Image (cartoon, grey):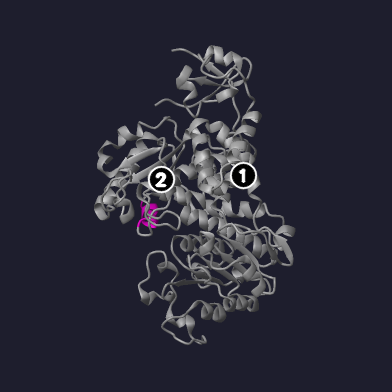
């Protein structure tokens, strides 16, 4: 396990890569391979003559060729498999291609297509990527982590495969998510792929279909729980701290019983965050913040109703809570503006709510004087009607939950209501953008969690803003790594959100365009990373550099996928 480093020639100032090997070994390594783009001098020096065809192509010509092959694939999963095979051959070319076709390819590289890849992972498996840590081998954690391709890992994305998108327990197939998420860190924030490590904790699965599949590659027993499960995670975290002491750890797609619990247990011990909770919270808050500014109002002027209150709902509400207190409200005043609705209606303390809902549960006297049909179960419409809600947030996975009656009431409550139907995939969205616009007389702000075709919003046909976590987590990761903060705080996510919202001109927000275009993701991540690094510095956690130097550091850390010269220095 060696280090991946870019060298600088002290005489010429030229950047180059010291090739660790030659010949077949070089062209078969996806980090180092240039394929047909190796120039003549490198072919001679690196033992490639005769291994490659005579013709030398520029990267531009290579990109033309691979894109031509990509568009020939008919289905999203076929396109996914093609891109994955390119990633396995030539990572520089893969990332250059995806950056050139960002809007087209991100739904293939990650959601929604990655869900199908996770579901069929064992059947699609061709080449190992990342590390698979089985509970049966956890005693060998140090040796397993030493099998990483490189020793200077900066970023780890880990899952146990229990809550994969809207598919639930996918066991070993969950590895498709860290692989995809790592790619988004590279595309979005320019973290070099050699410094990213996807990991799957294989603790079993409760998915009977997988357990009965003779081709399933994971361990075939029920998912571990309780002390056994905790011991695996504890050994894993200790191993990571030992092997990669400066790495950022992102928890991804853990089940609701473990996600927040693990984050709270380890966020002070290791630099880490959970994107399902805080990434979702931050991008949704940024969307709300942009809309509120367009309304020329404040966050504390709004009343927030949540339909569905698991990891995502908690993350959004927690981010709002911190932002509201920054506007001068007390914690109790801020909580009073938030109304969570779960499977049993409006959540009350007496219902013994789960850990996500508990901090935001209401008291019975909060609904005194409300117009209700059944005080024991207060539904969505009654909550929207009685609270005079101005912001409606859906993370329920219940298709069509935002009925015409509910949406029309939102239009009565506010001149410009904010409606966020965030459930994935598209078929589970609480409403369509068109339905929200029609029911509110075309005056609502609308954003979704899934991609929708352009819709009539505020009288104009426009692209529907998508609360895509990619606007946040790559920049947060880059900012945390660059600033060398020992932990990621709530304030850093608030700073990230406001940086994102500030990139939307007021005139655009007033028209309903609440987020930047995804094609500008590198610029977005640069601004988010800078804001996170600033906040780390102000909190006494990050490196102490003036803004100008901090900006330069963020920018210089962002890798551009292009071929550098190689030199072979024999040892």
Q: Find disc 1 in the rendering and name its residue.
A: 102
Q: Quadrant of residue 95?
A: top right
Sequence-first tag of 1 and 2: 1
Disc 1: CA contacts within 10 A as few (<14), some (14-19) or many (>=20): some
Predominant secondary structure, magenta span: helix
Q: Nearest the camera: 517 or 91?
A: 91
Left or right for 454, reference 189: right
- Let me know if residue 504 is in the magenta part: no
Q: In the rendered image of this protein, does residue 286 appear above or below residue 4? A: below
Seen at 44% across and 85% down, the residue is 375
Q: Which of the two residues, 359 or 112, is positioned nearer the viewer here?
A: 112
Q: Quadrant of residue 508?
A: bottom right
Q: SS at mark 1?
A: helix
SS of the residue under disc 2: helix
Depth check, mark 1 against mark 2: the one in front is 2
* Image coords of residue 98 (percent x, y): 59, 40
Q: Residue 264 in magenta?
A: yes
The answer to whether mark 1 and mark 2 are in CB contact below 8 A is no
Using the image as rendered, state which of residue 267 and residue 447 is in the foreground.
447
Report x, y in % for residue 355. 38, 64
Q: How many marks?
A: 2
Location of residue 418 in the rendering, given as x and y in whole percent from the top left corner? 62, 68
Q: Disc 1 to disc 2, how far (Cα)?
A: 24 Å
Look at the picture and state if 131 lies above or below 345.
above
* Circle 2 Cα neighbour tier, 10 Å, few/some/many (<14 / 14–19 / ≥20): many
The quadrant of the image that shows the N terminus is: top left
Residue 121: mark: 2
Res. 262 visible in picture: yes
Q: Which residues are magenta?
A: 258-265
């Amino acid at each position: 396990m060696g280090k991946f480093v870019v060298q600088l020639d002290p005489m010429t100032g030229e950047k180059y890569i010291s090739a660790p090997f030659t010949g077949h070994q070089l062209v078969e390594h996806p980090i180092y391979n240039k394929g047909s783009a190796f120039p003549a001098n490198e072919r001679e020096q690196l033992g490639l003559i005769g291994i490659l065809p005579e013709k030398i192509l520029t990267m531009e010509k290579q990109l033309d060729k691979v894109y031509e092959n990509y568009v020939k694939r008919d289905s999203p999963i076929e396109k996914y498999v093609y891109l994955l095979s390119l990633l396995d051959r030539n990572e520089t070319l893969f990332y250059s291609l995806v950056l050139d076709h960002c809007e087209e390819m991100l739904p293939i590289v990650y959601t929604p297509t990655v869900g199908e890849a996770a579901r069929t992972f064992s059947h699609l498996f061709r080449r190992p990527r990342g590390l698979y840590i089985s509970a049966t081998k956890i005693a060998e954690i140090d040796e397993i982590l030493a099998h990483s391709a490189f020793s200077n890992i900066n970023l780890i994305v880990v899952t146990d495969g229990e809550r994969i998108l809207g598919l639930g327990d996918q066991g070993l197939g969950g590895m498709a998510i860290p692989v995809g998420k790592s790619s988004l860190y590279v595309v979005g924030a320019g973290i070099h792929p050699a410094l990213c490590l996807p990991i799957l904790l294989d603790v079993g699965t409760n998915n009977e279909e997988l357990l009965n599949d003779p081709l399933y590659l994971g361990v075939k027993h029920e998912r571990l729980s309780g002390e056994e499960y905790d011991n695996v995670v504890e050994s894993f975290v200790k191993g990571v701290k030992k092997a990669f002491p400066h790495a950022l750890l992102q928890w991804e797609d853990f089940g609701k019983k473990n996600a927040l619990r693990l984050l709270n247990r380890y966020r002070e011990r290791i630099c880490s965050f959970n994107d399902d909770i805080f990434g979702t919270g931050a991008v949704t808050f940024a969307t709300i913040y942009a809309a509120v500014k367009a309304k020329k109002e404040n966050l504390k002027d709004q009343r927030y109703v949540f339909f569905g209150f698991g990891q995502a709902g908690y993350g959004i509400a927690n981010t709002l809570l911190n932002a509201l207190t920054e506007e001068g409200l007390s914690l109790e005043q801020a909580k009073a503006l938030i109304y969570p609705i779960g499977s049993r209606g409006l959540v009350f303390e007496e219902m013994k709510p789960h850990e996500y809902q508990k901090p935001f549960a209401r008291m019975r006297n909060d609904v005194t004087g409300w117009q209700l049909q059944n005080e024991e179960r207060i539904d969505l419409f009654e909550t929207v009607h009685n609270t005079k809600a101005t912001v409606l947030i859906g993370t329920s996975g219940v298709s069509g939950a935002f009925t015409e009656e509910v949406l029309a009431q939102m239009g009565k409550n506010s001149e410009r209501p904010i409606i966020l139907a965030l459930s994935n995939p598209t078929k589970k969205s609480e409403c369509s953008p068109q339905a929200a616009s029609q029911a509110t007389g075309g005056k609502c702000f609308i954003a979704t969690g899934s991609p929708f075709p352009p819709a009539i919003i505020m009288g104009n046909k426009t692209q529907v803003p998508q609360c895509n976590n990619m606007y946040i987590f790559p920049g947060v990761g880059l900012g945390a790594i660059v600033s060398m903060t020992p932990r990621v705080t709530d304030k850093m996510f608030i700073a990230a959100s406001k940086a994102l919202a500030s990139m939307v001109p007021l005139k655009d927000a007033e028209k309903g365009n609440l987020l930047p275009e995804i094609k500008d993701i590198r610029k977005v991540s640069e601004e988010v990373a800078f804001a996170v690094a600033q906040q780390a510095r102000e909190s006494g956690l990050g490196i102490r550099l003036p803004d100008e130097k901090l900006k330069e550091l963020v920018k210089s850390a962002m890798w551009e996928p292009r071929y550098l010269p190689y030199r072979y220095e024999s040892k």
